Image (spheres, coloured by chain):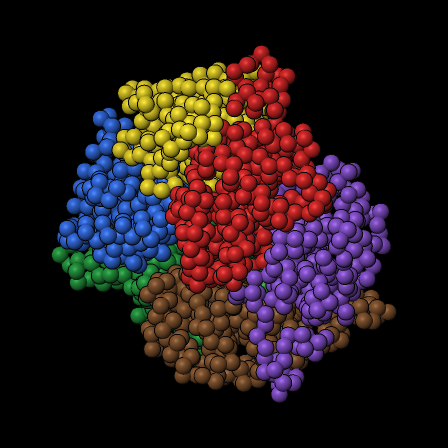
Chain colours: A green, B blue, C yellow, D red, E purple, F brown
Amino acid sequence: MRLLLINPNGTSSMTAQASRSARQVILKSTDIIEKTGIGAPLSIEGYADEVMSIPSMLAQIAEAEADGAEATVIACFDDPGLDAAREIAAGPVIGICQAGVQAAMVLAKRFSIITTLPRSVPAIEDLVYRYGAERHCRKVRSINLPVLSLESERAHAYSVLLGEIAKARDEDGAEAVVLGCAGMSDLAGKLSADTGVTVIDGVIVAVKLAEALIGAGLKTSKTNAYAFPRAKGNSRDESKSRSRGFQAAVQTSI
Amino acid sequence: MRLLLINPNGTSSMTAQASRSARQVILKSTDIIEKTGIGAPLSIEGYADEVMSIPSMLAQIAEAEADGAEATVIACFDDPGLDAAREIAAGPVIGICQAGVQAAMVLAKRFSIITTLPRSVPAIEDLVYRYGAERHCRKVRSINLPVLSLESERAHAYSVLLGEIAKARDEDGAEAVVLGCAGMSDLAGKLSADTGVTVIDGVIVAVKLAEALIGAGLKTSKTNAYAFPRAKGNSRDESKSRSRGFQAAVQTSI
Amino acid sequence: MRLLLINPNGTSSMTAQASRSARQVILKSTDIIEKTGIGAPLSIEGYADEVMSIPSMLAQIAEAEADGAEATVIACFDDPGLDAAREIAAGPVIGICQAGVQAAMVLAKRFSIITTLPRSVPAIEDLVYRYGAERHCRKVRSINLPVLSLESERAHAYSVLLGEIAKARDEDGAEAVVLGCAGMSDLAGKLSADTGVTVIDGVIVAVKLAEALIGAGLKTSKTNAYAFPRAKGNSRDESKSRSRGFQAAVQTSI
Amino acid sequence: MRLLLINPNGTSSMTAQASRSARQVILKSTDIIEKTGIGAPLSIEGYADEVMSIPSMLAQIAEAEADGAEATVIACFDDPGLDAAREIAAGPVIGICQAGVQAAMVLAKRFSIITTLPRSVPAIEDLVYRYGAERHCRKVRSINLPVLSLESERAHAYSVLLGEIAKARDEDGAEAVVLGCAGMSDLAGKLSADTGVTVIDGVIVAVKLAEALIGAGLKTSKTNAYAFPRAKGNSRDESKSRSRGFQAAVQTSI
Amino acid sequence: MRLLLINPNGTSSMTAQASRSARQVILKSTDIIEKTGIGAPLSIEGYADEVMSIPSMLAQIAEAEADGAEATVIACFDDPGLDAAREIAAGPVIGICQAGVQAAMVLAKRFSIITTLPRSVPAIEDLVYRYGAERHCRKVRSINLPVLSLESERAHAYSVLLGEIAKARDEDGAEAVVLGCAGMSDLAGKLSADTGVTVIDGVIVAVKLAEALIGAGLKTSKTNAYAFPRAKGNSRDESKSRSRGFQAAVQTSI
Amino acid sequence: MRLLLINPNGTSSMTAQASRSARQVILKSTDIIEKTGIGAPLSIEGYADEVMSIPSMLAQIAEAEADGAEATVIACFDDPGLDAAREIAAGPVIGICQAGVQAAMVLAKRFSIITTLPRSVPAIEDLVYRYGAERHCRKVRSINLPVLSLESERAHAYSVLLGEIAKARDEDGAEAVVLGCAGMSDLAGKLSADTGVTVIDGVIVAVKLAEALIGAGLKTSKTNAYAFPRAKGNSRDESKSRSRGFQAAVQTSI
């Protein structure tokens, strides 16, 4: 089976890292298409970064499905454009926050999430609520480091994460911790080993969930909210507006 | 005071209609800047339409603030890009769904919302939850007509709306009705007169709320989640990535 | 336009202070009627104080509407008698807690409230829930000072408020603070300037919201829960019970 | 033990009816003090009726506790003034809505409430939320008859109630029905026998719950929100304001 | 009237203690049947302990009803098997957690619960949510002592409880404390006296609530979810499966 | 990898059917151990059936893990004993209700559940709340047929299910339907094909999710609530109580 793993931001080294994590767990028969955001912010650290990354991501998803991708994993913990992606995709679309949260609800009674910057905390809290985990998630914590310093200040970031996991366990009563940034993906195993806490990386569980849904023969429902967009064009080229489909529209806009 | 009234979709006749509604209620001293989505879908009827309209809308908001706009009203009932707009704007940013819902919570104990297509119902329900109105909003209803037919099939749309308001009152126990599309703005007064029900148009209340917040001297908090985006550029032009601000980034991407 | 600003407690210096705040922000064309509770507790510091202040407040609202008031602002953060006031009034009735909370939900993702005595915390928490802000409000804090000491120990109160706002920002992650007592109204501007946090005073936003709703042509829905009271008199004078309206009833009881 | 059964409205025949229901179930050793609202509306059918009935009710509760009442039952389904009553009383104060809802949560998984007028539905829904029963209560229904017609049109009211209970069972899946008005108290037994549904009368369960809490030696917590009101007088007679307690204050105001 | 007080765990000294508490508050006319879990874990400290104690408990409840018990109190704070017990019993079945929580919601605005081991905290939080008390319960705390050490290390347990009640009052703003283990039952009075906080023991309030519901003539609704189990036998003896009732089934399985 | 698929009821033909569904989707490398409840009710149709099935199920899970099972799927839509099973198991334990609900939240905005008997509706609603899907699940419906008639009246059951799916789509606005009984497992594909609605079978998605979690290297967190039971024996054999582990205890009790 073929999966799209898309990193909506514009930093290809982060895509590579997420892909390495994914490749450690996928089935032999799984073929991963990697994509990095085109013209997107170098990291997603707020609402504007999020929305700026989505139009090109949608075009890339459409392209990947045309190339045979049966499911899509969005490798950014804000799950940017998740509803829109489900609308334009035929296959299942998995956000790493939703996947991480769902796994945590199966493996533990209470968990905490640890993200990068404090400014991302409210956005992730809103996702926790949207995914129905507000009674299971004790706290969304941050390590107060920008996304890109997960690469540039690796040892420091690791040490701060260790301390924050200990606080989650001791102060929050968290029984599991979900890593709140795709850029932390390759640290999950070592953090789990070093702390004894169940540490969940959203990239890994999202990729496995994508394989699972394909294996179950399930696709995104096209009955109502996630039905394909109605064809009507956009305002630059109104003459074509009734005859153009979604893919043309997204290509125009990026 | 100067307000931006932005219609994020690409249909300028809808902008004009919303503007007419707004101009009927604004203060003499208020100066409205009207903007229509550039390169945006002709109507917002789903998640993909929403996200495709946001990047250019953000650039237009930044531009309007540079031209002296003290507050922004987003004239689309899905409140597309509301968080992102608050992040890039200094002044208050008002979504017509949030404004309509807040007014309904002040004027009535229970209300319903009436939108255009059934596919928009779940998105609006999610907004109702997000704005904390899930205990006040009885139902999100739809008239099963596309947005643009509010203009092209005006009499029919009016008659269907009349029937749906009656159902909201009689079946839902709704004491007020919020019109769930900016394109219904100019019908609010007549619908209210014809049904005896309090009919709330989001455009009108949003514009008045914008004037109110400016008058109160309040701006968007820049303390955490809505702080201006961190400068770091985007992936097309990485060499500039540390020195560019948001406005440059959005201009690149549209 | 004419507004009623009613302080339901019996301390006229507090009415004067709230009125000064209001007059700094109202439109030139707005005419404020000020009223102070008659026979009411000198401050509202608990449920009994609240309910003791309501009957005379309702009579005063009816009187003010007879004198041309188009909207009412109840200048007490417990929003005492808000539903009852909406039932007897034709125009919109705004509580300063609801107005403050609604403004905070527009201007920030997360906020805290700071009130006077700890005993008021649960009542305000219940209001936060009622207004649907339980996911946006981080904490209701108190400075452990009685309402009247906001006047008598002004410098001390100011300094304690400064400290509590810092805690709200640092411990709660609050991006805005709503002042939880009408008696704090004149401190909002200076507190905001001194802390850099968006500080919201309910009196100011309520008065502006009242102007906005009048400007929008909206009134309280009379369809069901807020319909005018049914005429049936009260038990002291049963012979008249079928022919007396609400106003007579409230005048009897105070 | 001595209980106060207070009907906050001004119709003494309703007090007598509630008292008859109570006397059928109380212990031999229980002594009921009956009180009817003084100067109160003849029925409680809306928010204004509610708040107009509370000041005299509080004075009567204080009086009854001075006469040895160990607990209070407020015999009106809107639970008017419940928090205020708990603040001024030493003993437990039971509202018949809360008691009915708590009993229903013990005896059934899902229940509905049937009240008199449609205008009371939102107020009772708010109580259902407040008592944490929103996931157990299927629907608040009304029979569209005024409170006083429960006495004047008895046979008709009974027949309409029968039909509404059937709807609650068949349409709502209600396993129990709580009668949403003290004036329905004497119908509970016959309705239960005629429909086979568990019909719960709030007066009966409230009186028994009052006996139970007295028997358990429990009183209202005076630690914070329900602490006795702070002494400070009211605005008619400020000279006494520091030395007067609550009872004097309520007596002044009625 | 005759009540069953069943301790689902296998430690008879805990049954005796709960029974002593109950006997201090029951009516003279009440006759308590005491039962201790047969083949059950010696304490209930987790989900497996819970479910292992239920089958024999159900058989004992059926037996007690056959012997004339009109109501059942399950004396374990996890309320194990509460729904199942209501399904097989005709009379009301009261769990001490639900009873304690309901009493706390009547006597105080905010309360905390104090249990034994940290591992029980999430289970009790889930009960708090199930009983609709999530807005009233500030925190579920633990003293980090196993259930059986409430007997073996009595003085130490008492002193730790004292400290935890002080924290609940000072850190949580709790106005009442519910003791979260039947084994703490005999400490409630002294803890309340020593701390000044309203301390609620679930055993005591459950027994009084059971008397109250019997006195009110109410039974478990048999309309839907709590209808008696359908007869169909179990898999060891399929030949009898259509003719056997519940009691036979539970006796087979223990 | 080796999975346990356990049907907690005592009907082996239902186990066989669930197993056939599972075997159609599992990986080639997956080895399924099938188990049927021992001494368990022939179907799970209520709370008593549930709890009677759990003790033997726990023993069977312990046994299967000893035989190398790396994850467990409980093939009953009430998810009986899910928390207890997670406590005694080292590997992940998946309930088919939770798995079905999680898949529905990924594939659709709104879904409904269709179960067998009306008496199961409240129990499933409680699970929906527990799994955080109360905002996504429109309705829990029933076809009013006992579990075993899914086998004995197959054609009739199919036709009733078809009608109920149509109602879910048309009346509820459901975009997907989750089948609310393991006994419906083999109908999912045909129902989906015949109605065009996304029909989700919990058995299939649970088995795939189990494979996914094993593949991700994740196990049940043993940090707090799901830590293995504390050794202390049970009341039949108190002499051994400090030295016996869980497995011995469950074997004694069945």
**Quadrant in which the N terminus of chain F is drawn:** bottom right
Residue C5 falls in image quadrant: top left
Looking at this view, name the residue that lies furthest to the bottom: E239
Relative to E40, say whether D124 is above or below: above
Q: Nearer the viewer, residue D185 or A184?
A: D185
Residue E191 falls in image quadrant: top right
Q: Nearer the viewer, residue D233 or B15?
A: D233
Q: Residue at x 76, y 45 (%)?
A: E188
Horizontal and vertical percent position of residue A161: 59, 51
Relative to C109, say whether F111 is above or below: below
**Quadrant in which the C terminus of chain F is drawn:** bottom right
Q: How many marks?
A: 0
Q: Nearer the viewer, residue B195 or A40?
A: B195
Query: Is C53 on the left-hand or right-hand side of D142?
Result: right
Query: Is A144 on the left-hand or right-hand side of B254?
Result: right
Horizontal and vertical percent position of residue C188: 46, 25
Query: Is D228 on the left-hand or right-hand side of D145?
Result: right
Q: Residue at x 58, y 51 (%)?
A: D102
Can the viewer see residue F207 in this picture? yes
Relative to E57, say whether D119 is above or below: above
Residue E200 falls in image quadrant: top right
Relative to C165, say whether A94 is above or below: below
Horizontal and vertical percent position of residue A143: 55, 47
Can the viewer see residue C185 in this picture? no
Horizontal and vertical percent position of residue C156: 59, 19
Q: Residue at x 52, y 68 (%)?
A: F120
Q: Residue at x 35, y 20 (%)?
A: C32
